[in-house]
Image: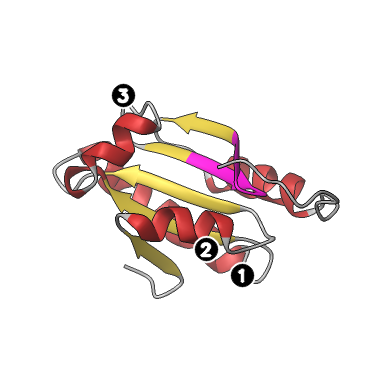
Amino acid sequence: MSNRVLQLAGDAVRKTIEGTDVPVLIDFGAAWCLPCRRQQPVTEQVARQVRGRARVCMVDIDGNRGLATRLNIHSIPTLIIFFQAIERERFIGIQSPEILIEALNRWALQPAPTDAHREV
C-alpha cells in the first residue's frame, strides 16, 4: 500500500474527518474482497494526484464492523468523501480515478466553514 494512503481504524476515522479542512476520501473494503483489491491501486493513484488538496484513507471493515454499521455500508468497496466533518458523496463499487479526483476537487474548492458547529 502507498504511504500516501492512511490506514485507519476505530476512533482514528472520526479524528481524521474532524481534524482537517480538506476533503477526506475513505475507501471502505476488506482483504478478501476482489473488487476491493482492484480498487486499491486506483485509490493509491488518487492519493498521489490529490496530495495536499485532500486526504485519502482506507478502512478494513472486518476490523471496524461497528463503524461500517453506523455509516450504513452494505456493499464494498464503498468510497465516501467527507468535508467539514460531514459525508458529502458516496460511491459504491469500483470507481475510476477521474471520478474520484473530480469529486475531491469539487469539495477542495469549497470555502472554509463560517460557523463553529460542524456535524459528524
Q: Is residue 85 magenta?
A: yes
User: Circle 2: is it few (<14), some (14-19), or many (20+) Cα within 10 Å?
Assistant: many
Residue visible at 56% across and 54% down? 24
User: Could you tell me what secondary structure mostly forms the magenta stretch?
Assistant: strand
Residue visible at 67% across and 49% down? 84
Q: Is residue 117 visible?
A: yes
Marks 3 and 1 close (CB-CB < 8 Å) = no
Q: CA distance from mark 1 to mark 2?
A: 6 Å
User: Circle 1: is it few (<14), some (14-19), or many (20+) Cα within 10 Å?
Assistant: few
- Report the magenta residues as a range: 80-88
Mark 1 highlights which residue? 51
Q: Is residue 76 visible?
A: no
**Coordinates of residue 4 in the picture (x, y in percent):** 46, 72
Residue visible at 19% across and 39% down? 33
Q: Hey, what amino acid is under mark 1?
A: Arg
Q: Hey, what amino acid is under mark 3?
A: His
Q: Is residue 66 left or right of residue 41?
A: left
**Residue at the extreme front:** 117
Does dot 1 land on a helix, a strand or a loop? Answer: loop
Q: CA distance from mark 3 to mark 1?
A: 29 Å
Residue visible at 24% across and 46% down? 64
Mark 2 highlights which residue? 47
Marks 1 and 2 close (CB-CB < 8 Å) = yes
Query: Which quarter of the rendering shows the N terminus?
Result: bottom left
Near-viewer residue (107 or 71): 71
Q: Report the disc number at residue 74.
A: 3
User: Circle 3: is it few (<14), some (14-19), or many (20+) Cα within 10 Å?
Assistant: few
Sequence order check, earlier mark of 3 and 1: 1
Query: Is residue 108 positioned above or below 29 on the image?
Result: below
Which is more foreground, mark 3 or mark 2?
3
